[in-house]
Image: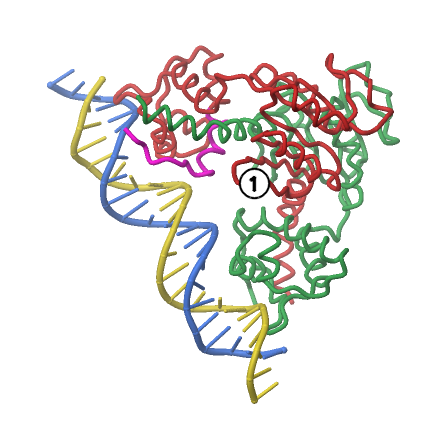
Chain colours: A red, B green, C yellow, D blue
DNA sequence: TAGATTGTTAATCGATTAACAATC
DNA sequence: TAGATTGTTAATCGATTAACAATC
């Protein structure tokens, strides 16, 4: 076939939502669904759903719609959920611990193999059967253990330093919770979770109406 | 003037990043900056920066650029950071505690006034001087205390129920960490933080190249 | 003044929606 | 077969980039 490579990020960011809704349908024993029905539940247009799915193959059938289980499994594969991933968390503060305890990630195939911090009060403590190690051992650990995804939960001042260690040790995917932008080579993927930016967006929207009321007044 | 209201979400989601970069420049005693220089740092095009800022007013000056402090403060106002907000967190598990402990939000004007859970083992414990209350008291609390932003950190099964209480009590902004979509009236703003979706996006991108390699092969 | 850089219009690019022939 | 619904092309809409006159 030779599909035109590279799916736009707009499409990619919708995929997990498809996966979630299809999972729910599956648990409710729904066997088949049309783009129209799915549209009503998920809130994308039927046209967009068909366009999105067609980027990856012909999953539907004219006159029938989509088989829920088959589509769920296909999207799972597209998202890479047919594989397992080893992860490490660096920074065992509040967010690091929250992420470590999110057992749902484990179920999706993301296995926490190490957790690191530099705070002596935390080193040695166990979180979900993993002993928090000294961050000074991180590089050594990464050389001896295969790790797919590095998770950064340290304060922003230390984030780049950790990213550099990740890159040096061959990690190709970084999940970054530090409120800063990381510099990494082109072949390393960074996915940011910037909580402050999310909160400020909410704050903006809460004030938007008023903002323009003032503008008009002046 | 009567500006054309409604800024696109694409622009809105860039605002916090402008605010963050300008804050850094300010701390580094940079007085003025051109869209070109800012472009090189922040990674948006100079043209986009000028377009974005012009949605809100004429903040720059031809031949000079933008005054860093003035622009920082203007964007702060646009984001609503000249005000204070009372917040409550419902769900004192890992994420709830992490959000509660994020002292930086406090500095931005978001004041945690209550934290709730239904787990008897957590009720009564203090987090940042706030005693965790029984979620059965939530509605009563909201009637007696002004709250601007409700933060949902409960499991997805209970999220809608909490959202309903928020809506009933007049809260107009919800920060939702539960991995589900909430149903609320049009005048209530929901900002989602869906960690799983972020992780699955990362997973997708990590596998993308291989995905299309397979496609071509078949 | 000359140089720099904005504000803003016009051109381009990309994403979404509409339409419909193909086909189950 | 007739009805339903996809896959896919074309049309529309919106966002980004380029260009440049205005102006500090």
Q: Residue B138's spot in the image, x, y percent?
A: 76, 26
Q: Quadrant of residue A98?
A: top right
Is any atom of residue B97 visible in this view?
Answer: no
Q: Nearer the viewer, residue A207 or D14?
A: D14
Q: Is residue B82 left or right of residue C15?
A: right
**Which quarter shows the N terminus of chain A?**
top left
Is any atom of residue A91 visible in this view?
Answer: yes
Q: Residue A96's spot in the image, x, y percent?
A: 72, 27
Number of labels in the image equals 1
* Residue beneath the point at 68% across and 29% down: B152
Q: Secondary structure at mark 1?
A: loop
* Residue beneath the point at 59% across and 49% down: B14
Q: Is residue B95 left or right of residue B36?
A: right
Instruction: Give me the chain letter of mark 1.
Output: A
Q: Indicate yes or no whether the magenta region holds residue B86.
A: no
* Residue beneath the point at 67% across and 31% down: B168
The residue pinned by badge 1 equals: A185
Q: Residue D24's spot in the image, x, y percent?
A: 63, 78
Location of residue A26 with respect to B41 vertically, above or below: above
Q: Nearer the viewer, residue A122 or A46?
A: A122
Q: In the image, which residues are magenta? A: A1-18
Q: Quadrant of residue B96?
A: top right
Location of residue A85 with respect to B36 vertically, above or below: above
Q: Residue A133's spot in the image, x, y percent?
A: 77, 21
Location of residue B167 with respect to D1 vertically, above or below: below
* Residue beneath the point at 59% across and 29% down: A171
Q: Indicate yes or no whether the magenta region holds residue A10.
A: yes
């Amino acid at each position: 076939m030779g599909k035109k490579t590279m799916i736009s990020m707009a499409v990619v960011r919708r995929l997990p939502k498809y996966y979630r809704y299809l999972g729910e349908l599956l648990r409710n024993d729904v066997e088949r669904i049309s783009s129209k029905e799915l549209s009503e539940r998920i809130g994308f247009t039927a046209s967009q759903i068909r366009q999105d799915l067609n980027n990856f193959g012909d999953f539907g059938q004219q006159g029938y719609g989509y088989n829920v289980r088959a589509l769920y499994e296909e999207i799972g594969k597209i998202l890479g959920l047919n594989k397992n991933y080893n992860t490490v968390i660096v920074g065992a503060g509040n967010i690091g611990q929250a992420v470590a305890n999110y057992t749902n990630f484990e179920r999706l195939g993301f296995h926490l193999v190490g957790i690191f911090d530099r705070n002596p009060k935390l080193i040695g403590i166990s979180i979900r059967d993993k002993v928090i190690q000294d961050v000074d051992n991180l590089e050594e650990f990464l050389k001896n253990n295969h790790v797919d995804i590095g998770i950064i939960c340290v304060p922003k001042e230390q984030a780049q330093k950790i990213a550099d260690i990740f890159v040096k040790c061959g990690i190709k995917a970084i999940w970054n919770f530090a409120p800063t932008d990381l510099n990494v080579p082109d072949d390393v993927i960074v996915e940011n979770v910037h909580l402050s930016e999310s909160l400020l967006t909410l704050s903006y929207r809460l004030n938007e109406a008023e903002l323009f009321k003032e503008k008009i007044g002046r």
